[in-house]
Amino acid sequence: MDLAEFFSPQSWLSPQRGPRYLQLRRRIEDAIISGNIPPDTHLPPERDIATMTGLSRVTVRKAIEALVESKLIIQRRGSGSFVAPRETRVEQSLSTLTSFTEDMGHRGMKVSSVWLERGLFRPTEQEVEALDLADPDSVVRIARMRSADGTPLAIERASLSPDILPNPLEVESSLYETLGRLGVRPTHAIQRISAGNLGREDAELLDVEEGAAVLIIERTSYLPDGRVVEFTQSIYRGDKYDFVAHLNLEKG
């Protein structure tokens, strides 16, 4: 794109269209959203945009600041203003019971994990109730920070009965793959989804700001006979995940 022609005010700047900084903001915003100005484009300095548009530098700065606030533009110290990279979001179905490893693998993404916890522990009251533990003295816990193509996406904390998973060290990549080998892979589950904000420790793990929005999913999964397999509490980055459910109209 010829940016000098793009910023030329004849085709878009008008006294009838509102404040000049808003007109400039909309001009740049529309071009970014439509892809006419692609991600990572280095925008001209504010003084050059002022010259091309005939606007004051104060007006240009106000428009750029609004675009930075809306995260369409990022500013790099010493380098200037750039169109923000296009965010890749993961769309996960709520209609099928799959593991993180399987979800990302279907998308051709490389999965990696950082182990946070793996072993036998004394269960909490919530774990005893959720898992219906026969022996309330011990529970298996597996906690990991999950990444896809190098981007941290989720923190998964799973609890299981030792009768289901006697040796938690058997889990290397996919928990469901391990459960499948043991003949106890769940066939159905109940999930509860809520919104939340990250605390400091989890925010550091996911490489986002403290207080960032997340989706919290509690899942209890079962064998065909109704036996509980796992109780999982997962945190998914709100800026990276979309959960999608396929709904059918109930026939009344």
Image (spheres, grey):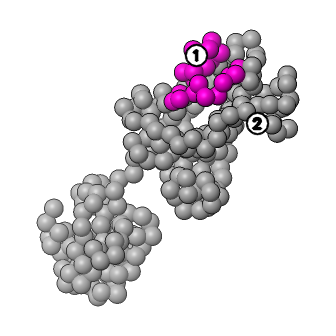
Residue tagged 1? 180
Q: Is residue 23 visible?
A: no
Residue at x-position 20% and y-position 81% = 48
- First in sequence: mark 2 vs mark 1: 2
Q: Is residue 245 visible?
A: yes
Query: Residue placed at 22% from the left, 74% from the top?
Result: 44
* Snapshot quadrant of residue 145: top right
Q: Is residue 248 left or right of residue 1?
A: right
SS at circle 2:
strand
Residue 69, located in which quarter of the rendered image?
A: bottom left
Name the foreground residue: 15 vs 246: 246
Relative to 161, residue 235 above or below:
below
Q: Amino acid at mark 2?
A: Phe
Q: Which mark is residue 121?
A: 2
Q: Which residues are magenta?
A: 164-185
User: Residue sitting at 61 percent across and 19 percent down?
Assistant: 179
**What amino acid is at disc 1?**
Gly
Q: Report x, y in % for residue 17.
A: 35, 75
